[in-house]
Amino acid sequence: MNTGCSFFLNQERRNIPLSENSTIVNLSERIKNHDISNANFFIEKADVKFSGPEGTQKFLASLKFIRPDKYLISLKGATGIEALRIYLSGDSILINDRINKKLYTGNSQYIKKKFGFPVSFIPLIFGDYISTNRSDDIEVKCKDGKLGLTEGISGLNIKYVMDCNKAKAVSIGVENSLNQLGIQISYDKFFEKGNCLQAKIINIIDNQRHTSISIDIDKIQLPWEGKIEFIPGNRYELVQLL
């Protein structure tokens, strides 16, 4: 029997109450229980708006995820025609540019060079908690219903602001080794069903590149039992991502 989430999202769901006092260990365990990447999932429909120095673009997006690190992303323009299909994994990236008939290919290091964080950080977009699995049993205390946690991973500092009632991040900042803030992500309109807890609205600001992305999730399946298939464009020009 499927006990996961599969529904249209049109309203904010109730919060899941937690104790104000906790330790880093048991709080992180509770937070991780809500992570969307604990299972394969399929975001069937999401409205995406990208804004940058060159203007604003709107897309209709879908995203398939298979644990631990495989993603297939489709972006369609206003006409409904797919513009880009992107495959990401822990070691490779493939992009079908259907508009320009180009196939971009490279390794996952390109993601870190281009955006400043590795593929393993992608779950942060959805508010998932990436940690160093620390074993210290330090007691932490929520203040005004919020808790700040910092994790140092891959030479970057991830600064979470957790909602203690939801046991979920309401904002995340990613800093480089010079403590320069790169990516800021905020979350709103959480929904839940069973162990699933996810934000419907996601706003991302890239301070280094002066761009922003807003995501509005309309329909999601979680867990999902499908497959990911990427078919390279026929006779597309091959372009190496360096």
Image: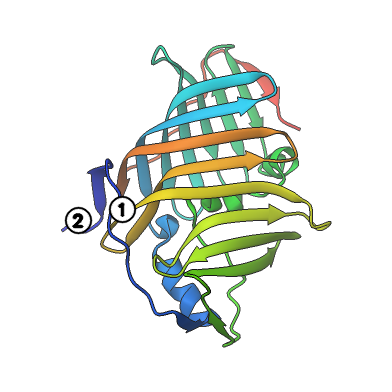
> Who is closer to the viewer here, 18 or 108?
18
**Residue 2: which numbered mark, if any?**
2
> Who is closer to the viewer here, 51 or 153?
51
19 over 15 or under it: above or below: below
Where residue 30 sits in the image (x, y, percent)? 42, 73
Q: Quadrant of residue 157?
A: bottom right
Q: CA distance from mark 2 to mark 1?
A: 8 Å
The residue at the point 59 percent across, 68 percent down is 148
Circle 1 is placed at which residue position? 223
> Who is closer to the viewer here, 75 or 235?
75
The residue at the point 31 percent across, 51 percent down is 222
> Who is closer to the viewer here, 232 or 156?
156
Say what secondary structure mark 1 lies in: loop
The amino acid type, in three-letter code, at marker 2 is: Asn
Q: Which one is earlier in the sequence, the residue at label 2 or at label 1?
A: 2
Crowding near pointer 1: few (<14 within 10 Å), some, many (20+)?
many
Q: Quadrant of residue 136?
A: bottom right
**Residue found at the far right of this picture:** 178
Crowding near pointer 2: few (<14 within 10 Å), some, many (20+)?
few
**Residue found at the far left of this picture:** 1
Q: Quadrant of residue 56?
A: top right
